[in-house]
Image (spheres, coloured by chain):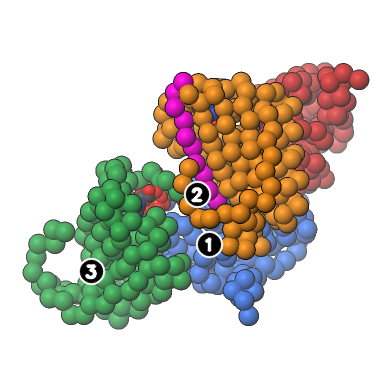
Chain colours: A red, B blue, C green, D orange
Amino acid sequence: MTKRHEMRGSIPVLRIGSTLLATIQVELRDSVAEDFQRTVLTRIEDTGSTGLLIDITALDMVDSYVARVLVETSKMARLMGTEAVLVGMRPEVAATLVRMGFPVDGVRTALDVDDGLALLGRLRPAFDL
Amino acid sequence: MTKRHEMRGSIPVLRIGSTLLATIQVELRDSVAEDFQRTVLTRIEDTGSTGLLIDITALDMVDSYVARVLVETSKMARLMGTEAVLVGMRPEVAATLVRMGFPVDGVRTALDVDDGLALLGRLRPAFDL
Amino acid sequence: MALSSPVHIRSSQEMAIESEDDVLQVRREVRVLAERLGFNPFATAAVTTATSELARNIWCHAGRGMVQIEVIDEEGRSGLRLVFRDQGPGIPDIERVLVGGYSTARSLGLGLSGSRRLVDEFNLQSQPGQGTVVTVVKWGRL
Amino acid sequence: MALSSPVHIRSSQEMAIESEDDVLQVRREVRVLAERLGFNPFATAAVTTATSELARNIWCHAGRGMVQIEVIDEEGRSGLRLVFRDQGPGIPDIERVLVGGYSTARSLGLGLSGSRRLVDEFNLQSQPGQGTVVTVVKWGRL
Ligand SMILES: Nc1ncnc2c1ncn2[C@@H]1O[C@H](COP(=O)(O)OP(=O)(O)O)[C@@H](O)[C@H]1O
Ligand SMILES: Nc1ncnc2c1ncn2[C@@H]1O[C@H](COP(=O)(O)OP(=O)(O)O)[C@@H](O)[C@H]1O
């Protein structure tokens, strides 16, 4: 199994009604990050999804590089007209990012996938399933 | 009674429906501050609370150190997906912080706990009890 | 330390600043004195907060030092004069720290610039390698 | 590298940093050690994140380098001391990168300033043309 396969397989992007759910379960390295962004944006276009949830429950560490990839992906989705919500950030990850001085404004977040879906529902009531 | 106990005991974190209420009644010193952040964020994760009220009615002084701890804690909670509201800031405390040039943007505030709960209810209508 | 006008020193005390506890102690003492002098809550919060910033700076950046706390009278008004002294590393670029937003610690760099805005008189003297002296005066508002 | 207090070095190992894989490897090793030392999840995340930033800097800005990872004891507490070394281009304006927000890459410039806020001791030495040495210490919280 090549590395590219390994990573492709490991960021599954599921469709839940009008929402896409991307679950990050591996360490985001450079190659994975770019692939992840491409996959997500292409699937938004293909499916016409109006919401994107990026689930990072599995990440026990988010450095400034990974944080930037996540925030950029959210912004790209938003430019396409899709609300993006980051869900499942662990307490110690949140604490670390804020202490580093990472600019957190403008990032939509929710506790978990359920909460994220509900938030999207409130943001885009017309589109919710 | 050790110092750690003393302070743990003195920043009680209560659950009110889907909201956590942290009441600061002691001077926030370095050790207390870190512990406070850890406790609040861990309880958000454990309880799945979608709102956090930090009640500082009892503080007759908030210097730049304490202000930073409060603002950072709010940001950390928000990254996890929990709305944070600072409640009960006294007039003289507000005046002092503004005069010092403390950056207050991005901090949600309410007059007291009741107003804070109402504000959270408006921010996250679906989750309010 | 150009506090030119002739002042009458009503009382004077010194407190050591060598721990975070000392920082809390000093600011409690200043609050008590401010209230006793009849400072309104805004002036009391202002001088207590400035005290907290300056005492914390000694503890964080110089390790140890002391504060001299004086109750003073001048032209019929009363106030507090606080002199914070340490023999720490000193501040190389005083102008920059007074503008605010500059910090060598993981903080906001509002301690010196902020304190200055909270008091009526502010004087900062520092020589790299020689230590730092910050003098502030706060008059009670009527 | 003024880490003045006498420390006891319990273990020491070196790891090369020459690829992104190495960056991941190094930060996994640091996480394992932090957990073994009983660091709480917040301290563990902090030191692992700082490691990731500093190791990635070597890989991105110097191409190759190494890290020395030590488990140390001092006055009854245990911690990790990490020394990141490279012979890359060095950093011309250390003050600027430590304030944060400055980057020659297309990133946020939070690696150095952010790491510094995550650890208990931080020391950066760099000479343009000579390379860079960053030493950090993180103590376990109780
Ligand atoms: N008493 C002192 N001795 C040495 N350096 C000091 C002292 N007070 C302040 N400084 C220096 O000035 C900088 C700015 O101080 P300040 O405005 O109080 O902000 P902060 O303490 O939050 O960094 C500090 O980061 C420190 O480098
Ligand atoms: N090990 C290093 N060797 C050479 N230059 C470095 C090194 N580490 C950091 N730098 C320089 O310092 C700048 C700031 O670094 P940093 O704060 O980590 O942010 P970033 O790496 O995101 O740019 C980098 O853009 C780079 O120019």
Residue B30, numbered label: 1
Q: For the residue marked with disc 3, what is the amino acid?
A: Arg
From the viewer's perspective, is C118 left or right of D108?
Answer: left
Same chain check for tags 3 and 1: no
Which residue corresponds to mark 2? D3
- The question of residue B13 being in magenta is answered with no
Q: Secondary structure at mark 3?
A: strand
Q: Which residue is mark 3?
A: C81
Query: Can the viewer see residue D62?
Result: yes
Residue type marked 2: Leu
Locate residue C55, reporting x and y percent: 37, 63
Please tell me which residue is depicted at 44% across the width and 67% down the height of the picture: C19
How far is disc 1 from disc 2 in space, using C-alphas?
A: 22 Å
Q: Which secondary structure, mark 1?
A: helix
Amino acid type for the residue under numbered disc 1: Asp
Label 3, residues with CA under 10 Å away: few <14, some 14-19, many ≥20: many
Q: Tell me residue D76's x, y (percent).
A: 62, 63
Query: Label 3 marks which chain's residue?
Result: C
Q: Place residue D86 in its image quadrant.
A: top right
Residue placed most toward the observer, C138 or C14:
C14
| Quadrant showing the C terminus of chain A | top right
Let me know if marks 1 and 2 both belong to one chain.
no
Tell me the chain of label 1. B
Above or below, B9 relative to A64: below
Foreground pick, B71 / A20:
B71
Q: Which residues are magenta?
A: D120-129
